[in-house]
Amino acid sequence: MNPQIEKRIRQSIADLSACQIETSSYEIKFLLAEVLNCEVGDVLSYSNEMTKQQLKQFEKFISMRHQHIPADKIIGHKGFYKHEFSVSYDVLSPRSDTEILVEATIEKVRANNCKTILELGVGSGCVILSILSDCKQLFGTGIDISTAALAVTQKNASAMGLSKRLSLRQADWFASNFVDQLETKFDIIVSNPPYICSDEIKSLATEVREYDPIIALDGGKDGLDSYRRIAELMPYLLNEGGYICLEVGENQAHDVSDLFMSVGLKPEKIIKDFSDIERCVIIKK
Ligand SMILES: C[S@@+](CC[C@H](N)C(=O)[O-])C[C@H]1O[C@@H](n2cnc3c(N)ncnc32)[C@H](O)[C@@H]1O
């Protein structure tokens, strides 16, 4: 192990935990890998001494972590599912729990030979781009209320060579003319909408509350505002026999299933995440 690197890792963890910032050796190695321009797995065996410039950049990263800025927002990218995605302060940081939504949707696309997919709320694009990348016959439409988020999706789509199979547009699903803006129905719809109860936002970790966009988090009084609206839209947006795959917050799976049942759809499956929390709901029209 490179002793200089080992010392930096130990020092950074101690510095940050003295300021009540939970961090892991993995996170510090992740920041070091960016500075050293190597893979995370190669950080410990990095053979050279760090240059003055590298040390300075690493100090800057650690001081940003001191301000609770998440590591992916510091370096501007994050690994999700099978790819690396650019991120910015305009998008929700991709969460590993959301990979379950991607897998479940890909399974439905393949089993039903879906040709068209709509994602409601693309953010960084990590969900729809991961799906398009694995399902070569699929054409996607992604919408988001945030033009800044759409610019990040577009950047990721170009980097992955998927721009030709993804059409992006700015739209608000609460708008009365939302359906007219889309003009068509889809074989499958996927969404990870904002689902945190408004009152709970203030108790979220600073990393989330301050550095993820509020529009990506706030689901209204009971967290279900967007699901209510999305359920209302299903008769107009989803083809007969099609599926909607949703990420949900803790304890929301059954309420969300009921909302979609009330518009005539059939909840088919609830999938748990690795913390045993019901995280995805799969619904058939
Ligand atoms: C929880 S984030 C999910 C982002 C990304 N799909 C992911 O899983 O990482 C929700 C996204 O929905 C978008 N959004 C929130 N309200 C919206 C609305 N009324 N109409 C359209 N998009 C909306 C936000 O801008 C945000 O990008």
Image (tube, helix red, strand yellow):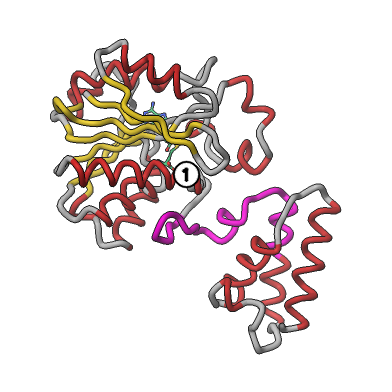
Q: Residue furthest right?
A: 18
Quarter for ligand 1? top left
Q: Residue furthest bottom?
A: 48
Q: Which residues are magenta?
A: 60-86
Q: Is residue 75 magenta?
A: yes
Vertical placement of residue 263 versus 122, above or below? above
Return the x and y of residue 47 as percentages of the image width and height.
65, 88
Report the front residue among 175 and 194: 194
Vertical placement of residue 83 versus 263, above or below? below
Left or right: residue 118 versus residue 74 is left
Task: Specify whether residue 74 is in view.
Answer: yes
Vertical placement of residue 1 versus 70, above or below? below
Ligand 1 within 8 Å of disc 1? The answer is yes
Task: Specify whether residue 148 is in view.
Answer: no
User: For the residue labelled by badge 1, is the local secondary structure a helix, a strand or a loop?
Assistant: loop
**Residue 149's image quarter?**
top left
Q: Quadrant of the N terminus?
A: bottom right
Return the x and y of residue 207 as percentages of the image width and height.
65, 43
Report the front residue among 223 and 149: 223
Which residue does the numbered mark 1 point to in the structure image?
A: 91
Q: Tell me which residue sits at (50%, 40%) in the image.
A: 273
Left or right: residue 277 versus residue 68 is left
Return the x and y of residue 183 as percentages of the image width and height.
14, 28
Left or right: residue 271 versus residue 236 is right
Vertical placement of residue 189 versus 76, above or below? above
Q: Tell me which residue sits at (69%, 29%) in the image.
A: 203
